[in-house]
Structure formats: C-alpha cells, structure tokens
Amino acid sequence: MSDAERLVWSRLRYQALGVKFRRQHPIGPYVTDFACLSHRVVVELDGSQHSPRYDRARDAYMRKRGWTVLRFWAWEVVSDLDVVIGTIANAVAEHPAGST
C-alpha cells in the first residue's frame, strides 16, 4: 500500500464509518482501492501512475453497474485526510444500503 492508502485504510477499517469497506476488491475486470459493498461506494486514490483515460473507462464501467466512484489524489489524502474521510462518509450516507 502507498502512504495515502495506509492513511485512508486506517480510517476506514474496523467499520469506523459505520460500514464495512474492503481493500483491493475486484469489480468486473478492475480491482478497486477500497469498496463498500453494502452502499456501492468505491474509493480510488490516484498517484502519478494513473492514466486519466484508463480511469474514465474504469469509472464508467463501475457507474454503469450502480457504483458511486470517488477519486482522490494522494496529495489530497496527505494534506487533508479529514476532508477526504468526510467526503467518503457523505457518499455513504447519500447511498443507503441496497440502493443503486
């Protein structure tokens, strides 16, 4: 895991937001950084190796299947983890369990 992934995982694990997230969860041909299956929320952390073209295709695939995809740059996580976690918490709250 990258430093940014470790930071986010430290705040998502053990159902800290009241929901379970999985790390490195496969959805179709893709593997997500973090996924909350019950609320269909995916969290992706992007570093310099990410390709916007590839990410757009990935996101479209997941959204077409009812997933909400949140993307954050690694520097955002490191510089303001609380805002990132707040955004994730809001997305979970906006997508109740079982909704699509």
Image: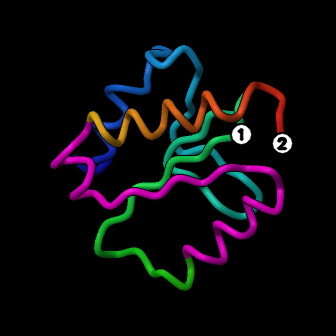
78 is within the stretch colored magenta: yes
The amino acid type found where label 1 is placed reads Arg
The CA distance from mark 1 to mark 2 is 7 Å
Which residue is found at the position 16% from the left and 49% from the top? 79
Q: Secondary structure at mark 1?
A: loop
Tag on residue 40? 1
* Residue topped by disc 2: 100
Residue that sits furthest to the left in the current view: 79
Residue 16 falls in image quadrant? top left
Region of the chain picked out in magenta, as a range: 55-81
Report the number of discs: 2
Quick one: quadrant of the C terminus? top right
Which residue is found at the position 21% from the left and 58% from the top? 75
Residue 37 falls in image quadrant? top right
User: Which one is nearer the viewer's eye here, 16 or 28?
Assistant: 16
In the figure, is residue 24 to the left or right of 58?
A: left
Which of labels 1 and 2 is toward the front?
Answer: 2
Image location of residue 53, percent across then percent down: 55, 85
- Decide: marks 1, 2 in contact (CB < 8 A)? yes
Tag on residue 18? none
Give the image's coloring scheme: rainbow
- Label 1 crowd (10 A; few <14 / some 14-19 / many >=20): many
Is 30 rendered above or below residue 94?
Answer: below
In the figure, is residue 48 to the left or right of 35?
A: left
The amino acid type found where label 2 is placed reads Thr
Residue 46 falls in image quadrant? bottom left
